[in-house]
Amino acid sequence: MGARAGSGRGQLFLRSLLLLLLAGSPALGQLRYAVPEELEHGAFVANLGEDLGLDVSTLSARRFRIVSRAGARQHLEVNLENGILFVNERIDREEVCEAGGTCLLHLQLLVESPLELYRVEVEVLDINDHAPTFPWQEYVLEVAESAVLGARFPLESAQDPDVGTNSVHTYRLSPNGFFSLEVQTRSDASKFAELVLERALDREQQRVHRVLLTALDGGVPERSGTAHILVTVLDANDNVPAFDQPSYGVSLPEDAPAGTLVIQLNATDLDEGPNGEIEYSFSGHAPPRVRELFHVEPRSGQVLLKGRLDYERASLHELYVQAKDRGPSAVAVHCRVLVHLLDVNDNAPEVTLTSVSTPVLEDAPPGTVIAVISVLDRDSGDNGRVSCEVGPNVPFELRTSFRNYYTLVTTQALDREVVPEYNVSITARDMGSPALLTRSTLTIPVSDVNDNAPRFLQPSYSVYVMENNAPGASICSVSALDPDCQQNAYLSYSIADGHIHGMPVGTYVSINSDSGHMYALRSLDYEQIRSFQIQVQAQDAGFPPLSANVTVHIFVLDQNDNAPVIVSPMPRNGSVATELVPRSARPGYLVGTVSAVDADAGLNSRLSYQLLQATDFTLFSVAPDTGELRTLRSFLEQDASQQQLVVQVRDGGQPALSATVSLLLSVVETMPQTLSDFSEFSLPPEVSSSSPLTLYLLVSLGSISFTFLLAILILTAIRCRGERRSRQGDSCLPPRCRCCPGSRPSSDGLKTSNLTAQPPAGTTAATCLDVPAGGPPGYCYKVCLGPESAQSDFMFLKPCSPPRNNEKDPGKRSRPEQHLQVSKETKQPNTDWLPPSTQRPTLKRYRTQQWGNRGSRWKG
């Protein structure tokens, strides 16, 4: 028996190889193989790598696999090392395919990079692994002794789960003298046996007949099952029930509830009494599944629905019902009831995400495959036809690859900064009425690409920094945003290369590359640099990196860090400034003007003058705005002949800074020809040489205007010589100033000094010219050129403001007897505030300090 089984299994294996050779090629899109059932684990099925034309070495990297529904048993598996399809677990055909016919395993094979889908069908071949069995090992058949020859008595059918030739093929009856066996075939090709009476029965001779019924299948090796039949001979009940028709057909919807009447059977018996009372029941031909679904009322003949029908499992049920009277020797008659199930749309489509490739890059081109989706509807006809669609307003669409298989692809470019994640709703809808649908949501995250440059929060930045700031102090912070994420949004800040006043920008400011905080690397000085701008760059860490620039304007705010500087009067040889005052001076007599400058700006450079100390406070006063020193009253005999004054100049800053100058005024009866300390002063020669800007300006302006000015000086020298000899010859009022034609008198009645400068002994007299300046109308300016001024003939072309002291030493400025000390580093002139008109001639004389103005005396 074992040898026969091995031989039969070998023949089936040869059949599977033959079907493999006859299967469709991969070019047709689907492969088909055959494999016997009950093979052991690891049994060879097919070489998929070779049949599909795939490179076996890349199967593992491309994730070659069998895709199955969740919860389904994996009967077959693929070896990724050689591409062979093998048996993963024992296949029981009767378990996998409950219904008869061809048993197919549908496989979906998926390989990635690129994404490809293959369909493979594996037919499970039946082997003869089941023997026929009868419902009972022994049962009783009652036959009336009056049964006519040829009477047929259906016997219980044997059941064999195998199919085809392996199912019940025939029946055999043990030899006897009364009965023969005839094998019948049903519409489904199944076999059943009928006992045929061949010889008249005589109960009185033999009441019981025993025969052995054997059921044989057609498999190799052949298997069989037996049942003992006990034939009991009954007394005559000569009429048997009869059905209206031998076969009935009925249609029933699959969703019919339990208790539904399937059919009303009716059989009649001409006998009376118990012999005419009919009972209905399932015959032995009814399979167990039928007995689970249906029930026959014994008395009424109604066939009722007992269980739940399923069209997808079986669309037709064949019922065998027998009718038998209650009389002695009752003979059962049989009829067949065919119950056709009507499909109802009771199965919603099933959506399975076979493969998902997420996340997707935001720069993925249209048509990129995101997922493979399979849909299945177990209904039939229109109820099983499924359409699949995606929700609106998403950049995705479904494309059909195979029947009930779809690929989800992109339709347009994605932008993670607009939509970082998509929840795609996939709706599968069948064609039934009413239609059933299933929705499945697929979450698709979008991966970032560095496609956005950083963007600063402001188009430009304006920063105001107080001068004298501490080096290393934070001055501002810039901030930029990048809508990308992760490293593409990580920003680093830097300062673009450049120069500020000839120095690299990196020596002025620095920036924290992570936070964007900017720091001053040096202490800024408003008098040297008032504003500058730098370029700040923000760059992300993406590949390739993207960047953006912004301009930062830095304005230096002035601080009151420069004390006023007295420019007139200037003491000689480190002594106190002296001046002569005629005793005949009347009240309001202009002794002179104290002039000072302040390198600061705004209120910090607005100066006020006051008389700090005086021998007699009732004799002199100082104008707080102009610095003019005037007499308050006429001189008396008892007034001292020398008056000591200390004048303080204070700026308007907070806190205010000041400077003082000491004056010694000598009261005389007549005014000698002496030089006034108010009218001329000299700066150390290093002042002009220490300022490159002043030197450049002198050279450029001097070279341009030398010829013009020289001609004017020669023409006016003779006139200025005569006017200088007069006490009041340098007044610039219109009736007396010949060198200022067309100039108008000053509105404030400014009186110029009437002192005449005496040249030093052994020198040639200086040439003095009154030259109209480019300032406001109504003013004249002295141009005094001496032989010693050969190196400073054009010093009057210096900037409009005097050089300023950069040496910040408030302690030295505040001394009352301080003399003018000028640093080698000259600050830029301040133009934020102009002194009153009464101070401008004095300031002009300060600018032309090297001319050697000689000839002014104080005039009241």
Image: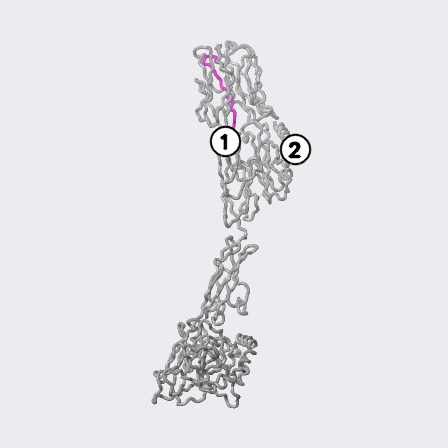
* Amino acid residing under circle 2: Leu
Q: Which residue is mark 2?
A: 21
Of 794 and 241, nearer the camera is: 794
Distance between the alpha carbons at the discs numbered 2 and 1 = 40 Å
Q: How is the image coloured?
A: one colour
In percent of width and height, residue 555 lies at: 47, 66
Badge 1 local density, few (<14 within 10 Å), some, or many (20+)? many
The reply to whether residue 44 is visible in this rendering is no
Of 837 and 598, nearer the camera is: 837
In percent of width and height, residue 796 lies at: 51, 78
Does the CB distance between marks 2 and 1 fall below 8 Å? Answer: no
Left or right of 206 on screen, residue 259: left
Q: Quadrant of the C terminus?
A: bottom left
Over which residues does the magenta segment extend?
A: 310-331
* Amino acid residing under circle 1: Gly
Of mark 2 and mark 1, the one earlier in the sequence is: 2
Q: Is 179 above or below relative to 654?
A: above
